[in-house]
Every structure is written in structure tokens, then in C-alpha cells.
Amino acid sequence: MEKIAYVNGSYVPLSEAKVSVLDRGFLFADGIYEVAAVLDGKLVDNASHLARLERSVGEIRLELPETIARIQEIQKELVARNKLVNGMVYLEVTRGADTGRDFAFPKGVKPTLVMFTSEKDIVGAPSARTGINVITVPDIRWERRDIKSVALLAQVLAKQAAAEAGAGEAWMIEDGKVTEGGSSSAFILTQDDVIVTRQNGSEILPGCTRKAVVALAEERQLRVEERAFSIEEALAAKEAFITSASLFVQGVVAIDGKKVGNGKPGPMTDRLREIYVEFAKATAV
């Protein structure tokens, strides 16, 4: 069965899902996106993702073409139509298509809204058991990384460098400190059992999974510090891990070819993953 996508008010076969070549998302990367995980046919932590969507579009003065409630209805309808059990729903909104190409915001143009689904066994992923290697790359992105923009060229290059190195992720470095991964938030566990992740700000995307993991850890009275850390500190740590909607919590076992801890996902990483999966299943809608 061919997958079904949503394009500007219509549910269509994925092969027929099209937007104009004049769409500003295509011409200028003038758009915002979100990715929500699906477990057992339900959306994980979706309110957090939709709140971030509202914030991001607000930061670039882009009006949503549908209400947040209607967007969630469309997400759920796509899950149902595609009989999706485990995977993701991708959502993108752009400023729409004008009659030509001009940098300034067009007037009287309705934003484009596109959604589609993909299958993925996030909970049962083999890399969750083995952990992943990461490499480091310079952070060459713009200064508003807190906006979930579709302008992802720097991340594409970082992820390609990781793929060519046989690594699962790239950690981006700025002023000697880790900002975040190409598509994930970065964490370490220090030798005195403090969970460390970079504080929110314009330097990083405010990760929804990151936010939930920090809250879940604090609820269990685990020590959490939100601050920048260096690769040297990460290599000296007990454990390292990443979080994202498409991975949940996943151990980092080596950085630039050097082992972290004993080179395996640590007990804190495994425990936080268990806690997050429990949270995800209990709160999915």
C-alpha cells in the first residue's frame, strides 16, 4: 500500500504529493519543521512539539495555516491512514508560493503545510543496545539555532561527515564547547554522577526529548547541570548519550575514535532510556 501524505488540505498518495517550484521553503528555506515520534499508533510528547512549532513560526513571523488542534487532528489521521504503528510524523510549514522569487515576504499568500509519515522501530533499534560513535565538527550554523528552521545545510554536511567516518552522529563544536549533535541533544555523566547538557539559548535547539529527559531525571532526584562542556570533559566522563524524537535516549560509546567510559552504553544511559520509554508510552495521544 502506498503511503498517504497531506498537502495543503488534501490527503494524497505520497508519489503525488507536490508543492510549487516557487514555494519559499524550496527557494529560501523559509519554513519551519517538526518531527513527532509514534509508538503503538500514538503521538509521543506531541504537545511539546506543537508548542515548539508555534514558537518557531512566531520567531520568523510566519502564520500557521491551521490551528494547533487541527494540525494534531491531521497528524492522527495520517497515522491512521498509513496504519503506522511505530515511526514518525514529519510536518513542514513554509511561507507559501508567490508568483515569482523575491526575498521580501509576499502579501496575500497562504502558507504551505505538508505532512508525511515514516516507519521506524525506535524502541527496538540495535544501536540503542550497542551505542554509537560520534565525530566532532566545527559548528558553522547561523546564530538562531533555537528556531527549528528547514535550513539544515550545515547539519547535512555534519551528518555526511559522520556517515563517511562510520559514526552515528556528529557533535558540533563552538569556542571549544559542544553545542549539540547534527540532529540530537548532547549529554554526559560526570565522574561524580552529574548529568550535564548544554543550557537552552540561541546556540542550540530546545530539544523536546531533551526537555523531557531533564525533567524525568530531576523528578527522580538525579543531579542535572545545564551548562556547556568540552570534548575533553566528555572523554573523561563516565557516560555520554544523545536524545532526539527519532532516537529517544542513545548511548555514545566513542568520540573521534576514543572510548567513553568502558566503550559501552552505561547504566545511567540505559536507565534514562527505560524511564523515557515508559513516559512516552504512558503519555502518548
Image (tube, helix red, strand yellow):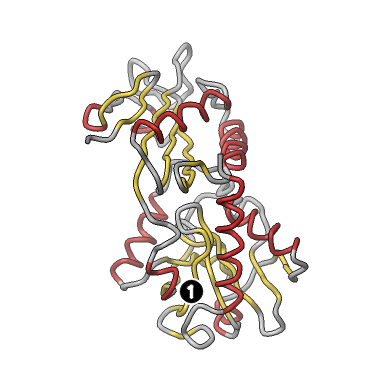
Q: Residue at x 39, y 29 (%)?
A: 114
Residue sitting at the far right: 221
- The spot of residue 43 in percent (x, y) is 51, 41
Q: Which residue is drawn at 41% across and 62% down?
A: 124
Q: Residue at x 36, y 71 (%)?
A: 167
Q: Is 17 positioned to the left or the right of 56 in the image?
A: left
- The spot of residue 131 in percent (x, y) is 44, 74
Residue sitting at the far bottom: 262
The quarter of the image holding the C terminus is top right
Among the 4 quarters of the image, the one containing residue 169: bottom left
Camera sees residue 135: no
Camera sees residue 248: yes
Asked if 137 appears above or below 211 in the picture, the reply is below
Among the 4 quarters of the image, the one containing residue 218: bottom right
- The spot of residue 136 in percent (x, y) is 45, 71
**Observer-nearest residue: 255 or 101?**
255
SS class, disc 1: strand
Asked if 15 appears above or below 268 in the picture, the reply is above
* Kind of residue at badge 1: Val
